[in-house]
Each structure stands twice: as C-alpha cells, then as structure tokens.
Image (cartoon, rainbow, N blue to C red):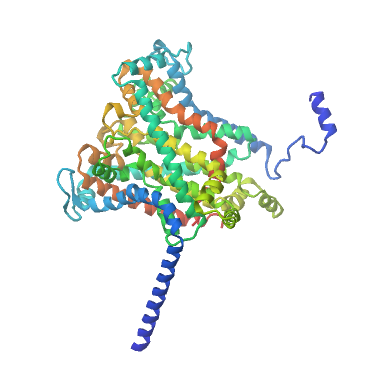
Amino acid sequence: MSKKRKKEIEEKPYRKPLVKKRKPNRSIAGDIALYLFLLLVAAIMVFPIVYAVNAALKPLDELFMFPPRIFAKNPTINNFADLFVTMGKSWVTFSRYLFNTVFITAVGTAGHLMIASMGAFVLAKYDFPGNAFFFKIVTVAMMFSYYVTGIPNYILINKLGWIDTYWAIIIPAFASPMGLFLMKQFMEGLPTSLIEAAKIDGANEWKVFFRIVMPNVKPAWMTLIIFSVQGLWNNRASTFIYSEERKTLVFALQQIQAGGIARTGQGAAVLVVVMIVPILIFIFSESQILETMASSGLKD
Amino acid sequence: MKENSNGYLQKYFTLRKHNFKVALKKMKASKNCYIFLAPYAIIFTMFYVFPVVASIYFSFTYYNILEPPRFIGLNNYISLLLEDDIFLIGIKNTLIIAVVTGPLGYIMSFLFAWLINELPRWVRSVAVVVFYAPSIAGNCFVIFSVFFRGDAYGYVNAFLMNIGIIDNPIFWLTDPKWMLPVCMLVILWMSLGTGFLSFVAGLQGVDRAQFEAGYMDGIKNRWQELWYITLPNMKPMLMFGAVMSITQAFGVCDVTMQLCGYPSTDYAARTIVTHLFDYGFSRFEMGYACAIATILFLMMILTNKAIQSLLRRVGT
C-alpha cells in the first residue's frame, strides 16, 4: 500500500471501508468458479466479433492462408481502402449511399422520438377512456416481427404511392411500438406532483410536455434514439426501394460483400463497418440505456 | 318472474347508458390527451394494427396483387395444413428452434445478467457490452459460415479431425442432419438482446433491504436468495423479456437463410418465416402468405399467454 493511501486512511478512517463487506451467504470458491465461468463465456461470445475484425485487417495472402490464423500478422487497412475504391467506381457515389442512410436514420429517429414521446406522455400521466386498451395493443405489437406485417404493409405503401421513396421506411419507423413502450414506462416514474405544480402555475399540456416532462426524461430519449438508429441503420429496405440512388448504405455494402471470392477482403471490411456503428453507439450510451431499461417491466 | 327479469334488463341498460355517458364526458374532458396521442395512434394503426387485420382478411382470399382478391374461404389454410409438406417442415423446424432457443436464450439472458450483477461497476459495463454486442452486430453472424465450412479448411472440421473425433469433414451447412443444430447455436449466440438489458437494469433496482431481511430469515445460499427474493422482484422484467424472446424465437429466418442458403438442402432449414418470405416476395401469392402470417401470429399470441401464466407462479 502506498504511503499516500495509508495516510489518507489514517486521516479519514470512516470514509471508505478498505475491504468491501462480502455478502454473508457467498463462498469464495463459488465466486471464483463463477468468475472463471463468466470469463470463458465472455471469450466465446466475443470471439466471432474479434475474428471478424481481424479478418478485415488481414492482407489478402493471409486471408487465404492455411492453416488460417485468428489474429492478423501484418494488419493493414488495405481492405477498407479497397472497399472505398469499389464504392467509388459504382455510378452512385459512396456519399450518396451515406446520405440516404443518414437521412433515413435522422428523420426517422427524430420523428419517432417526438411522436412516441407525445403519445407516451398522455398514456403515462392521464387517465382517459381507451388508455389501457391502447397500451395493451402496443405491447402485443412488440411481438410482430417485420415479416408478419410485411405483406399488407407493402400493399398499403404501394397504395399510398410511397414505393421507392424514403417515406416507405421513415413513416412506419415513427410508430415503432418498442419506443412508445419504453418511453411510457419511464415516464410513469416521473412524479405526478411535478406536473400538477406546473398546471397550478398556469401551464397548459403543451407547456408541461415541452418544459417539464421532456427535459426530465433525457435517459429515455437516448434509449429511444439508439434503438431507432439501430433499426434504421441496419434496414436494408430492399423490398421498398429499388432505385440504386436511393438505396441504403448497408444494402450497397452487402451487395459488395456478395461479390464472391475476389471480394473476400472487402466483404470482411463491410462486416466490420456494418456492425461497428451500433456497437459504438451502445458503448457511449450504455448507462442511459440501462437507466431506461430499469423501468421496462411489464405488469400483468 | 317475467316482470322481474325485465326490470333487471332495464336496470342493466340504464346502467350501461349511464356508463357510456360518463365515458363520453370523460372523453370530452380529455380532448387534449387524444390530440397528443393522435399522431402516434394514426401511424401505429396504419402500419401495425391494420396489417394484422388485413393479413387475416387476405388469408381467406386468393390474391396475387395484379388481380383483385378473390374470396376462397378456408382453402388457403386447408392446403397449408394438409397439402403443403414444406410448410409442415417449416412448422416443425420453427417449433424445434423456438422450443430450444427460446427458453434457453431467455434463461441465458437472465443467468448472465444475474451473474454479472455483483461485479464491480466498470467490469459490469464491459461485460454488458461483450454479451450484448452479438445481438446488434448486424450480419456479423455470417462469420460462422467460415467456422462451419463443409470442407477440411473449416475451423470446426479441422479441429475435430485433429483430435480424432471425426475422419471426414462434416458438411455442417448443407447436411440436413446438422443444419438446425448449427443454426440454433448461432441464434443462441445472438440471443442476449433487449431482454438481457432489461434484466441487467432490473437487477440493479432490487431493494437491498430485502436481502438483509432475507439473511435474517435464514436464506442460506445464493440460489435461495435468487428464488425467494430476486425473482419475485423481477417479475415485470421477466414478462418483458419473455415477449422479446418469443419474437426472436418465432421470427427466425435471417440466420437460416444466410447460413444454410435459400432454399436450403431438402428444405431442412426452412422456417415458417422463410416460407412466408418465399410465397410473399418470390411467388407473390399474397393470400397464401397471409395465411402463413396469421398462423404464425396466433402461435405467438398463444405462447405469450402460456408463458405469462407460467411466470405468475415464480417465487411461490
């Protein structure tokens, strides 16, 4: 123990206990076994991702080497550079694909946040006929995977004339049930007295919503944004959009990936580009997401 | 006697009328609420409720988009269940996948959330990222097709041949015998998703005082603590996690389609959703595809009901 630390402890003996008190019903052997087990599982979980990243960093000769190596020996970023060149050669530029994805993601997320928060606010804080019923439908709708509703959705979007426009992806994303659900559960934790106080001071519903409620649910904002971005970023939208210049980045990248054995290196790079964005976003906002998820429970 | 029942009926209707009037008044009073909810409600109804209703309607028709839908009664369902052998394979596969990966993924989600709960704060954050990452890693799972390659160059084959368990490489992704197990492995790898996050967050919120009280009352080990204190506190999150697991377990199709090919050998990796995709987006038999969607939808709702009633017994 360093001298400084010793001195610190002598000076303020009750500030922080040196040894954390263990829970009474834990055995040390059990703890160690559990941690080893967790370490092993974590290694298994992370292995494919590590492998994918390394594959993207391998030069071509290493990619086809036998026996294959897990870690790249001479890591390069050639694959990413090649990917950029290939994208540059297509008649739709890389920046156009990027713009498509960013536009869809940004507009879809912003609209979703706004509309879902408005709905969640009244569902959480007001009692009106149809409230509970509507929320129940939303929770059931969380179960529908994209494909179950896909066909009537296609027919509907076709009737609306939105095929081959961004709106075919953006507008349905506004009403994603997961966002409303999380927002509503989080808003229920907000003290009702806060809203009542504002009302007595003469604020109407809109003011309460924008000035009181929204600033107080920032963690839930982040969570909504992240889930929405994840969904929209990974949206290939191949059934709704067929004009090359309106396709999303992920779709274009995966077309390159499907280019066969000559594109092995670039394919590996694509894999990394596609997966790294949601993972990075998650890492930067983990604490806020967890704060929101704490109120995600479903009461029966 | 008759007069009496008439009286009851009358009373019943007056009561109904009264209730209705009260509700109407309440609705008028909460006009603002409806204005707030309206944008969401309209879009939600259009893209989430209407499709389900439309699906049920189209499932009774023959519809190929070009011609208007023609009503054919239960024919779609009859041919699905009695004549379409591939669909029956799909149902069988989906059920196998759902029964294995659904509960297992759910238990894994909870188990790992619970185990990392007592770790120091920063270790826990790292662990959450590590466990959660596979489920948001896009189509990173295609990397498994490298591990499970059918020739001696695949890692798994090479490993098994080196230690002498097998002599010849196994065609993991083209041999009907092995396709499903491999897919299930990959699905399990990806199964720590939103439900897992919910569990991690929920466990942090369990009241510490309850554990102290539990020690006083003679709870001996961590398993008793789990069953009598932690789990009952986690019920709402468990419900939420169950919904998430069902969605995942029944909606399997990306993994099987990208790993085993579409269509797969002997349709051995066909799931209900693959079948739906086939009829809806390749053959454009929308009515038939909608019947598949309706069946899937019913299966999901029933499973959800069953699991909810099961979860009510936790901790008793």
Q: Is residue A200 left or right of residue A231?
A: right
- In screen coordinates, is A278 left or right of B251? right
Up the image or down, B53 lies above or below A243; here it is below
Residue A201 visible in the current orientation: yes
Vertical arrangement, residue A129 with respect to residue A70, above or below = below
Query: Which quadrant would the N terminus of chain A be assigned to in this image?
Result: top right
Residue sitting at x 48%, y 10%: A74
In the depicted structure, whether residue A24 falls above or below residue A43 = below
Residue A268: horizontal and vertical position, in percent? 40, 21
* Residue A100 sits in quarter: top left
Measured as percent of width and height from the top left, residue B164 is found at 42, 22
Percent x, y of residue A288: 56, 39
Q: Nearer the viewer, residue A258 or B178?
A: A258
A69 or A215: nearer the viewer = A215
* Residue at image location 56% in from the left, 58% down from the top: B316
Residue B32 drawn at (x, y percent): 45, 56
